[in-house]
Image: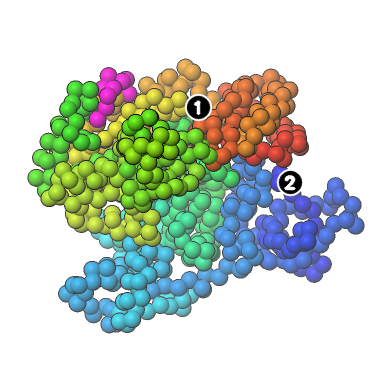
Amino acid sequence: MRRIFDYLPHPQRQVVVGGRVRVPFGRRMMVGVVVGESDHSDWPVEQLKAVDEVLDQQPIWPQSLLDLLKWAGRYYQHPIGEVLTHALPKKMRQGEQPNSADIEVWQLTDAGVAQDAQSTKRAPKQWQLLELLKAGAQERATLSAQGVTGATIQAVAKKQWIESAPLSALNESLSQPSNQPPATREQSIAITALCSRLQGFSVSLLEGITGSGKTRVYLDVMSQVIEQGKQVLVLVPEIGLTPQTLSRFRHHLGVRIGLVHSGLNDSERLAAWQAARTGELPVLLGTRSAIFTPMANLGLIVVDEEHDGSYKQQDGFRYQARDLAVMRARNEQVLLLLGSATPSFESLANVEAGRYQHLTLSERAAGGQLPKIAAIDMRQQVMTGPLSAPIVKAMEQHLQANNQVLVFLNRRGFAPVLLCHECGWFAECHRCNRPFTWHKGFRRLVCHHCQVERPVPHQCDSCGSTQLVPVGQGTEQLEEALQEQFPDYPVVRIDRDSTRRKDAFENLVADIQRGHYRILVGTQMLAKGHDFVDVTLVVIADVDGALFSSDFRAGERMCQLLTQVSGRAGRAGQQAQVLLQTHYPDHPWVQQLQTEGYQQVASALLAERKQAQLPPYAAIAIIRAEANDETKVAEFLAAAELVLNTAAQRHEVIVMPPGPCAMVRKAGRYRWQLVLIAPQKAPIQKLLTESLGEIESSKLAQVVRWHVDVDPHDTV
């Protein structure tokens, strides 16, 4: 609801702005947040209800963070109530009181300290737990993020090697920070430059090739901030990156580190939120929602892999965490450090405009050069499986040298289409009008758009033939083919299906790093920041689908993804290769990736964007609508177009005619969109602020689902 509600103050207790209250709302009692106070109301005083209970004596957010939340609601054109709700842990939304004394930690007993690797020879997971706790007591959530299961904790506790204790009663002594190898010349320059900016607001973009040691720079700057008695907020794009990041941070900083991400239960999230708010946590590590966590004495914000699309929330409150990090750093007058090997075009444009400091790391910390990409022309190859003969030969050479090979395919499942060989029928999701993906391991057909499943048919639904054949390939099929082709080398598959169980991803990554698997098959989950030192060959099995996307950001995303995947090879300084299978070796993007680095490719694509007046040299917002009846969707957006056009010329905003989305039907609902384009962000904001009230008040707005997406990640 795009409004706030007026209440009379509590008759006996002081109500604070930014605090929670319990109020009557219709026939229910609900928890709300006080966003302001006034001497008058648009409603008669006798009609106003009074606050029933005051839940907080002090604001739950500092004023700077509350101002950020209000700004975010205005900028992303989202109801302030949902913005504030999104920023609170679930238990706080339910009216519970935060209590950091409730945090349970595990620590070694005297018996646990006396154990060695020999005593746990048959239980490596138990030894891993003991090793982790030697650095100091840790919460269950922290241990879980490092691959320790609840069963392992209970088994070791039963042996009385570890014990639990409340954090408030614990006199914790963490290990001293470990000694690191000397920083490289480029790292030293970057560290010095960043440490000189720790007083006051500024934004620095650290662009370092894969393996150049960006994390080392983070750690040295973080150490300086912690020594000053201040806190650090670190954002990572996905949960999968938190275990290795957490391990490195604990090992090198020697301080307690909290976690905030969707993999934690409600109590764990609330405990970390409160510990950061009260200043007990020197470092908070989390995914995009962690940007809203209050911190008592914030001194630095780090956004790792700042280009990653995971920082953009795709439903509900559609915010961009990287951009909110800029606003929060400005509000709290701290340094924001953005890091990436493939910076977003938005960040590069800000560097070009002089708004961001630009620091570069052009050499790998462990020595060696970035592997060169070589394209294999599929049109001239005889295929005996999913991979061409030159790639199979290269894999054999690298495997025989006792190295690992990473085979990348960004398509999970066994095959994207199940086709009837007799009549051409294919299994299709009737809610989305898209083919089902065959998941052989689950023995199911799954729609990757709406998650509907059905059994694999024994015969064609159209002609009754039993000649059903898979068309195309996914990671399951690739894994199966490689196991047959290389029976002497263990193969592992990393995708959303193989890592569904809790801790599965962390355990598989740990096994890869120990060298248990020699061939790694996976989707983009394997491309993001993982350090596999034995990988010397990266094979990109199929890139052709990304070459012809209708999204203007397709080139940027493809180059970022392929550069990131390629960067997994040769990280320990070995000679490495990257081989790319394509039917279009002469495509300009493929040619550029082989001969130029990311900076050169990005510069060329940015020049095209500037000429076409597309982001980051223009602003875009999209109004999307969906309903079971396509006519109602079209009518709603046509009416919205009329409202917007009334003021669009005054604000110098172009209102594109509404039309169907690239995927017209999803989960049984028809989807259309209306695009707004302007040279600057401010005109779009003014137009939307003026017009959304009228659009929302129409009858059709109550019939269709619709939302506004400012700075959208996808435009098709």
The one of 426 and 542 positioned closer to us in this rendering: 426
Question: Which residue in the protein does label 2 denote?
Answer: 3
Question: Within the magenta stretch, is there residue 584?
Answer: yes
- Left or right of residue 405: residue 666: right
Across and down, in percent, residue 335 comes to 46, 45
Give me the C-alpha separation between circle 2 and circle 1.
Answer: 31 Å
The one of 190 and 447 positioned closer to us in this rendering: 447
The one of 159 and 466 positioned closer to us in this rendering: 466
Residue range of the region highlighted in magenta in the rendering: 581-589
- Left or right of residue 382: residue 272: right
Question: Which residue in the protein does label 1 denote?
Answer: 615
Write the residue at 62% across / 54% down.
Answer: 85
Dot 1 amino acid type = Pro
The answer to whether residue 337 is seen in the rendering is no
Work out which residue is located at the far front of the displayed protein and give it: 464
Question: Within the magenta stretch, is there residue 689?
Answer: no
- Left or right of residue 539: residue 644: right
Write the residue at 27% across / 24% down.
Answer: 583
Across and down, in percent, residue 595 comes to 24, 24
Choose the circle earlier in sequence order: 2 or 1: 2
